[in-house]
Amino acid sequence: MRSRAEIERPPQGPPQPRPGVRLVPIGYRQAPSWTGELARRIGHVLGGAVGIETARLSLESALDVHRGQYNALTLLEGLIALPGSERLLGIVAGDLFIPMLTHVFGQAQLNGRGAILSTYRLDNAVYGLAPDDTLFAARLAKEAIHELGHAFGLVHCHDPDCVMHSSMYVEEIDLKREDLCSDCRQRLSGAAV
């Protein structure tokens, strides 16, 4: 016969897995060809399942016609209203801003559900340079992992090689690794989901 303490104690199972991530292309007729590779790269660094969402979100409400840019905070609000429990990474082709900055590569809710990322300033064409698909894919993966890192509770890192290091310019993205430093990896492992 089991004691009262054994009956009342909840069963101790394995730790809960980290919630999955869904990539949500916004403003695209269909998911861009690079989403599968991006999902693989995110999963490799952050762990967990990474899927691709087919939800249709509108860019129109976030457009600031005077700036010719999309308000990242407005897009983030629409994104996190989607049903589910996964972390969401919205991806747009247009240029993003937040009211206090001229542009941002992305924006996230710290330890929240959503993050948004723009491919616009990750493309060499914006700087008058020749296309480089390999460089674009690396920049995209680094910024996606960076913004999702914020959603999982990570803050900016002082290690310039860490993907969580803040980047104001695309050259700074190019200099950092597509991985977390050991300190950020440890914080992510201990982060509440």
Image (cartoon, rainbow, N blue to C red):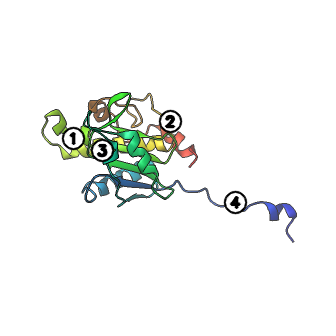
| Type of the residue with mark 2 | Asp
Residue 60 visible here: yes
Q: Is residue 8 above or below residue 175?
A: below
Instruction: In the rendered structure, find residue 183 and report the number of the disc placed on it.
Output: 2
Decide which of 20, 106 is in the foreground and name it. Answer: 106
Q: Locate residue 3 relative to residue 126 in the image: left or right.
A: right
Tell me the distance, in whole angstroms, between the alpha carbons under discs 1 and 4.
48 Å
Q: Quick one: label 4, few (<14), some, or many (20+) residues within 10 Å? A: few
| Type of the residue with mark 3 | Leu
Compare marks 3 and 4 and give the one earlier in the sequence. Answer: 4
Q: Quick one: label 1, few (<14), some, or many (20+) residues within 10 Å? A: many
Callout 1–callout 2 Cβ contact below 8 Å:
no
Tell me the distance, in whole angstroms, between the alpha carbons under discs 2 and 4.
28 Å
* Quadrant the N terminus occupies: bottom right
Compare marks 1 and 2 and give the one earlier in the sequence. Answer: 1
- Residue 131 at what x, y percent from top left? 15, 42
Q: Disc 1 marks which residue?
A: 123
| Type of the residue with mark 1 | Asp
In which quadrant of the rendered view does residue 140 lie? top left
State which mark lies toward you, 1 or 2: 1
State which mark lies toward you, 3 or 2: 3
Q: Disc 3 marks which residue?
A: 140
Q: Quick one: label 3, few (<14), some, or many (20+) residues within 10 Å? A: many
Helix, strand or loop at label 3? It is helix
- For image coordinates 50% across by 36% down, the residue present is 183
Q: Disc 4 marks which residue?
A: 12
Compare marks 3 and 2 and give the one earlier in the sequence. Answer: 3
Tell me the distance, in whole angstroms, between the alpha carbons under discs 3 and 4.
39 Å
Helix, strand or loop at label 4? It is loop
Q: Quick one: label 2, few (<14), some, or many (20+) residues within 10 Å? A: few
